[in-house]
Image (cartoon, rainbow, N blue to C red):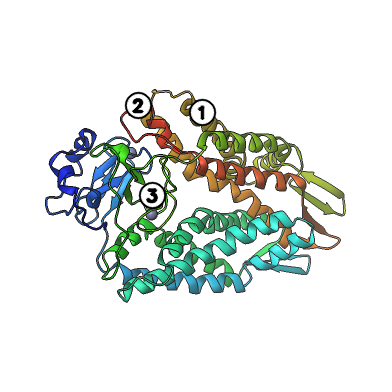
Amino acid sequence: MVGNSHNDNAYASNPPEHLLAATSIVPFLPGSRGLTDALVACHDCGRLHRWRPLGRGERARCTRCSGELYRWHDARRPATMVAVTLGAMLVYLIAQCFPIVSLDMAGLTTSATLLGAIRVLWDERMQVIAAMVFFFAIAFPALELGALLYVSFGLWRGRRVRGFNMLLRTVQGARHWAMTEVFMIGVLVTTIKMTSLARVTPHPGLFAFGALTVLAAMALRFEPRALWAMGDRLPGARPAPVPVPATPGLPSGFLTCHACGLVNRALAQRPRPHQRCARCATRLHARIPHSIERTWALLAAAALLYVPANILPIMYTASIGGTEGDTIMSGVLLFWRGDSPGLAVIIFVASIAVPVLKLAALGVLAATAQLRSRRAPVGRTRLYRLVEFIGRWSMLDIFVVALTVALVRFQALATITPGPGALAFGCVVILTMVASAQFDPRLIWDPVDSHGEQRDE
Ligand SMILES: [Zn+2]
Ligand SMILES: [Zn+2]
């Protein structure tokens, strides 16, 4: 928590008007030391709320956009965190070392580990896709789990480990790009797809990935922001004093940290120097700089690449009958006409519907924010959350292509190689994910809430 400041009483006795609205759900805590001690900013709309302790299983929600502010945490949490993360690390190692499935076809057998699949992609001159699979299914999950394990081990022993802030920022960043659950669905889709072609035998890697998906989902509940708050309560944690705002009492005097969520007091001097968060030293901005411009640029690039992603083949199948290219749509139609319409629906939703929906939704969000529209801010905030949630699922097809290419290697009988469409498609997914991360949802609320935090920088 932020240290006591001599000006706090002035805030507590005369609180800003728009903070009062929040008190109905998150009332002011009488025993709290000061206003910034007890302030929580909504990630999605920027509204400030007063912190209060929660009962078992409770969640505090934003009074304006109903986004989750924070949730109840068990006091015995660090021990659970260490156990879950350690378990996840162990199954992660098993999942990476053992083959996932093997294929039997006319006396020939192939099997694939995840690393083996990446090596095949690399040898097929698809280095970019190999790198994508490596980072999303191997590197980022390892980074997330490793950093989380180290931090939670420290918290369990009652101390903030060296590099506490950097490690928590690593957890936050790696988590955004770690796609264990998407990869797991990719494995299942590939397995079902292969059953029509050859005999499929599951291997320990498959079960380990299943267990890893469950444990990684449990680890998601250990949020970096809650861990930062936990670290604040440890003895010896002494954040730098928070400067007094230029206009006392007005919310424009506060800057919320993008990383740890701490509500900082804005420096009084103008022009404002590059102020950093008092807790984690991340550079503070009222809004993500050039948010709308960057969102547009990334969206334009994604929309351009969406065309080759759908026209060019994502896979080539070479068999005795010759070589055949498959685009995303022809693959969907093949499943639809064949014996697995369920797979056709999954691939259609993940690879065709979700990217189009994302492009359209981000376009609407950027355009309405740019025009400073005041219409349906709650609806647009929900749309933003949906885009953030579904974005990663488009990677499904890339994982399916990677595994299929690694498994179907029966020399003369049948060999599948990746096509240029897969490369373009992977880039579309990454660009739209970066675009939605660059879009600042608080811009939706700025025109509505004219006395909200002022935009600058
Ligand atoms: Zn909100
Ligand atoms: Zn911070």
Read off the residue under disc 1. Answer: 364
Q: Secondary structure at mark 1?
A: helix
Q: Earlier in the sequence, mark 2 or mark 3?
A: 3
CB of mark 3 near ligand 2 (< 8 Å): yes
CB of mark 1 near ligand 1 (< 8 Å): no
Q: Secondary structure at mark 2?
A: loop
Question: Relative to the observer, which residue lies in front, 326 or 1?
Answer: 1
Residue 193: percent from the left, percent from the top? 65, 53
Q: Residues within 10 Å of mark 3 (few under 14, many from 20)?
A: many
Residue drawn at point x = 71 percent, y = 44 percent: 424
Front position among marks 1 and 3: 3
Camera sees residue 343: no
- 295 above or below 139? above
Distance from disc 1 to disc 2, alpha carbons, whole Å, reads 17 Å
The circle on residue 448 is 2
Q: Picture quarter containing residue 111?
A: bottom right
Q: Find ligand 2 in the image and state its quadrant.
A: bottom left
Q: Residues within 10 Å of mark 2 (few under 14, many from 20)?
A: some
Residue 253: percent from the left, percent from the top? 31, 40
Q: Earlier in the sequence, mark 1 or mark 2?
A: 1
The circle on residue 255 is none
Distance from disc 1 to disc 3, alpha carbons, whole Å, reads 26 Å
Going by the numbered disc 1, the residue's amino acid type is Val
Question: Relative to the observer, which residue lies in front, 443 or 378?
Answer: 443
Going by the numbered disc 2, the residue's amino acid type is Val
Going by the numbered disc 3, the residue's amino acid type is Cys
Most extreme residue toward the bottom is 157
Read off the residue under disc 3. Answer: 257
